[in-house]
């Protein structure tokens, strides 16, 4: 006989009320019985624990049944309810059922897929055929177009190599180098066409695969000639971002700020870069030092201007304009004899402005007076 869960719970309550230690003045006998009752209830109320308990009892009963009795016969293995353990026992049946269920699940999981498919409708087959044909035709057209554009570009390169940028653009209207060549030709005319050059350079920048700093630099020159200084500065800034230490770019940006925009304070970082990376005694170094001196003169920093112009005077490229400017700086610093010497040197180099200053400032008298002072100092 197998008790249900409710029967087990009801029996537990009755026995607990009967053997609880609190109801029996803390009797040790009742306390031990209550512990056994509680342990039995915990096992019987849990299905897993109950099955494990039956399994242990089954194996113990099997061992006992295997040992002979005093009469020489083996005793059958019985469970706690009097049922006989063995192949027909409840646990054996349950275990067999579990094994069978697992085998069925495994067979279901590994069964071959159903390979039978429903036939596709006619419209699906037609649509599939149309899509395949469309992609096939599109691929052929794209391949032919690629061959055609490659052939036209090869012709454009050949035309440009021969100096005919117009024919090159007719063959390949997206040829950036041809637009650059056309822009340069506009600048070589007797009256440079800066507008046309800007238009061609803009198209060249549009069709270039990789931005070219030289193209931006050339367009900046055209903007500067048209006095569009903001656009010129923008192009030069982008060109410098592509080629940071290029002396020519930094020098032209500095000259734009110093001579055109008249904001020499913005030219300082570009002048420093140009002077740092320029080759010794190079024309670029001379131009950078000259712009530095001229910018300091505009800012009113005469000592700095004198230092820069003196450095430029030591270079082989020193010209009349530098000595003319240094004459003004010396005059404002109160170095009248030195200013006259600079104007005199610039005069001998062909500067008419220096000749006027030399005469206006009475430099002949000043230099004569300086020579006399030097002669007196020598006699002493």
Image: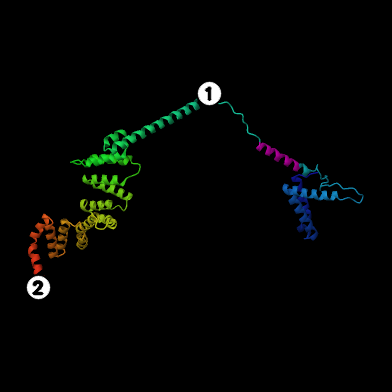
Q: Nearer the viewer, mark 1 or mark 2?
A: 2
**In which image quadrant can residue 371 be found?**
bottom left
Quarter where residue 268 is shown? bottom left
> Where's residue 38, x and y in %?
75, 53
Residue 34 point in image, percent of width and height: 77, 56
Q: Quadrant of the N terminus?
A: top right
Image quadrant in which the C terminus is located:
bottom left
Going 70% across and 38% down the picture, which residue do you hit?
104
Residue, disc 1: 122
| Figure disc tally | 2
Name the spot of residue 73 as percent of width and height, x first.
Answer: 90, 48
> Would you call the spot at circle 2 few (<14 residues within 10 Å), some (14-19), or many (20 or more)?
few
Judging from the image, what secondary structure is the residue with disc 2 in? Answer: helix
Whether residue 231 is visible here, answered yes or no, is no
Mark with earlier residue (1, 2): 1
Can residue 241 be found in the magenta stretch? no
> Is residue 144 rendered to the left or right of residue 301?
right
Question: Which numbered dot is residue 296?
Answer: none
Residue at x-position 50% and y-position 24%: 126
What colouring does the structure picture have? rainbow
Q: Residue at x 77, y 53 (%)?
A: 37
The range drawn in magenta is 94-110
Question: Could you tell me which secondary element the residue under label 1 belongs to?
Answer: helix
Relative to 255, say whether 158 is above or below: above
Residue 17 is left or right of residue 240, and the answer is right
User: Which residue sits at x=74%, y=40%?
Assistant: 97
Instruction: Give residue 353's position: percent from left, percent from top.
Output: 11, 55
Using the image, tell me which numbered label, if any, was put on residue 376.
2
């Amino acid at each position: 006989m197998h008790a249900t869960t409710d029967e087990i719970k009801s029996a537990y309550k009755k026995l607990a009320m009967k053997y609880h230690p609190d109801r029996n003045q803390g009797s040790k006998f009742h306390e031990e019985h209550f512990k056994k009752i509680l342990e039995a209830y915990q096992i019987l109320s849990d299905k897993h624990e109950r099955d494990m308990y039956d399994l242990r009892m089954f194996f113990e009963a099997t061992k006992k049944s295997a040992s002979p009795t005093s009469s020489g016969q083996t005793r059958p293995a019985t469970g706690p309810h009097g049922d006989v353990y063995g192949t027909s026992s409840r646990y054996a049946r349950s275990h067999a059922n579990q094994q069978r269920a697992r085998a069925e699940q495994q067979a279901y999981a590994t069964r071959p897929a159903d390979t039978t498919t429903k036939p596709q409708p006619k419209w699906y087959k037609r649509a599939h055929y149309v899509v395949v044909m469309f992609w096939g035709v599109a691929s052929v057209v794209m391949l032919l177009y690629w061959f055609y554009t490659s052939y036209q570009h090869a012709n454009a390169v050949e035309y440009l190599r021969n100096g005919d940028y117009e024919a090159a653009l007719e063959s390949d209207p997206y040829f950036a180098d041809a637009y650059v060549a056309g822009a340069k030709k506009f600048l070589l005319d007797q009256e440079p066409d800066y507008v046309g050059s800007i238009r061609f350079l803009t198209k060249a920048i549009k069709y270039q695969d990789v931005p070219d700093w030289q193209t931006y630099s050339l367009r900046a020159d055209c903007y500067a000639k048209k006095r569009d200084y903001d656009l010129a500065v923008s192009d030069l800034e982008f060109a410098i971002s592509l080629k940071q230490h290029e002396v020519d770019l930094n020098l032209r940006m500095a000259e734009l700020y110093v001579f055109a925009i008249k904001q020499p304070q913005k030219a300082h970082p570009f002048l420093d870069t140009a002077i740092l990376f320029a080759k010794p005694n190079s024309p670029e170094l001379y131009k950078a030092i000259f712009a530095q001196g001229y910018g300091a003169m505009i800012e009113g920093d005469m000592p700095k201007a004198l230092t820069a112009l003196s450095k430029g005077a030591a270079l082989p490229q020193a010209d009349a304009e530098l000595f003319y400017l240094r004459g003004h700086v010396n005059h404002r610093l109160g170095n009248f004899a030195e200013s006259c010497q600079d104007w005199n040197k610039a005069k001998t180099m062909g500067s008419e402005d220096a000749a006027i200053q030399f005469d206006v400032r009475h430099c002949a008298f000043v230099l004569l007076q300086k020579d006399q002072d030097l002669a007196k100092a020598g006699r002493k």
